Amino acid sequence: MQPTGNYNPIPGDYVVPSAPPSYEEATLCHQPYPPPPHPGMEAKLMTPSPPYMVQPAPVQPPVTVQTVYLQQPVTLHDRPVQICCPRCNSLTTTRLVHTSGALAWLSCGGLCLLGCGFGCCLIPFCIDSLKDVDHYCSNCQALVGSYKRI
């Protein structure tokens, strides 16, 4: 199909297509045959799209990343535990200090009731397994926690 007249397309100028070429015209010009329009469908005019413009990416403030360390709850007993100190954030083994607690006093009172006088009732204050245990950080000496017998 030859254009009629001296029409030279200008870049950016949009040409409105006319009716599609017939099968004979398409095969004679060695052009691909366009599919025929569906019944009830009309040929739509091509509308020009707006020119493609590159927009710079919006400037976003820098993202601050904060690292959070989660520690499983540590069960304190009557022996040293390895723990991350909440005060100095160092991984240390706790230092133990035994203090007289409720169990030592109840044992002393029980021995007095049984007739163990003359100082024998004070034996529970010498036995570490009857005392409460305070856990201290071995690095900064802060109290980490306590283990109460009763």
Image (cartoon, rainbow, N blue to C red):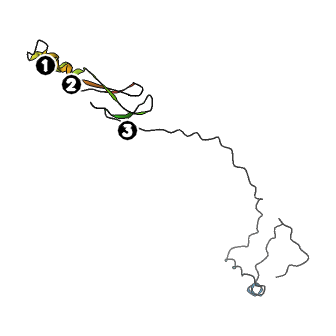
Q: Position of residue 109 (x, y in %)?
A: 15, 17
Of the numbered discs 3 and 1, the one sitting upstream in the chain is 3
Work out whether residue 74 or residue 18 is closer to the camera in this orientation and state it.
74
Do the residues under discs 3 and 2 have CB atoms within 8 angstroms? no
The amino acid type found where label 2 is placed reads Leu
Is residue 2 depicted above or below 93 in this figure? below
Residue position for label 1: 110
Residue 94 percent across, percent down from the top left: 35, 30
Q: Quadrant of residue 23?
A: bottom right
Q: Earlier in the sequence, mark 3 or mark 2?
A: 3
Q: Amino acid at mark 1?
A: Gly
| Residue occupying the point 20% across, 19% down | 125
The quarter of the picture where the C terminus appears is top left
Density class for disc 2 (Cα within 10 Å; few <14, some 14-19, many ≥20) is many
Q: Are marks 3 and 1 in contact (CB under 8 Å)?
A: no
Q: Which quadrant of the figure has residue 28?
A: bottom right
Q: Where is mark 3, residue-wise?
A: 72
Q: CA distance from mark 3 to mark 2?
A: 28 Å
Front tag of 1 and 2 = 2
Nearest the eye: 59 or 100: 100
Identified by mark 3, the residue type is Gln
- Secondary element at image label 1: helix
Residue closer to the observer: 141 or 55: 141
Q: Which badge, 1 or 2, is on the more N-terminal residue?
A: 1
CA–CA distance in space, label 1 to label 2: 13 Å
What distance separates the C-alpha of mark 3 from that of mark 1?
39 Å
Q: Which mark is residue 130?
A: 2
Which numbered mark, 3 or 2, is in the foreground of this view?
2
The percent coordinates of residue 132 (x first, y second) are: 26, 24
